[in-house]
Image: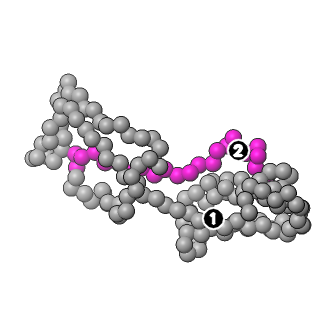
Amino acid sequence: MDANTVKWQNKPVINWFLRELYTTYRDENPPQPGGIFTLTVTFSEPRNIEIEGSEYLLSAIACHAKKTQIKKKKWVYWSGDAFYDWHTNQFAIPPEGVIVGSPVESDLRDWDDYEGELPDFSSSDASGIFRAIVYNKNRWDESRNAETPDLSVL
């Protein structure tokens, strides 16, 4: 069954669950093993919910969602007028120097998968070397609000 075929007032209820997951539960760890969230809406009285074109009288509806975390890596190559000072463990750029980095795709899905543990840079001796950890989380697209039923009022 396609989750988009479950509708209330001709709006897919999956949109309400997605909005909840992307907003209310965005930074929470799943309470169930395997990264599973279960969100349940219990209606104040039974409601007619359309499922694949037929209506059914329901007293509640639930959504099970699996949260996945994917680690990615991207190597950036630098060239230019800098030099590494071994005494201070830092890169130095002359006042008129120019540094150029290789392109970085903004869509993290294009980056290579990373299987290792994320390094703890807070206690690293790698001072002077550029490093970044980017957290990209799914966000709710506010333009979808018009096609999202408000299940919280039921």
Magenta portion: prevailing SS class? loop
What secondary structure is marked by label 2? helix
Q: Can residue 153 be seen here? A: no
**Viewer-closest of 115 and 22:** 115
- In the image, is residue 104 above or below residue 74? above
Q: Which mark is residue 65?
A: 1
- Residue 145, quarter of picture: top right
Magenta stretch?
127-154
**Residue for badge 2:** 144
Give the residue displayed 42% in from the left and 41% down from the top.
105
Q: Earlier in the sequence, mark 1 or mark 2?
A: 1
**Residue ID at (52%, 62%):** 68
Q: Position of residue 96 (x, y in %)?
A: 20, 24
**Whole-percent x, y for residue 131 in the image:** 31, 48
Rendering coords of residue 71 (x, y %) = 42, 58
* Quarter holding residue 55: bottom right
Residue sitting nearer the eye, 19 or 14: 14
Q: Is residue 85 visible?
A: yes
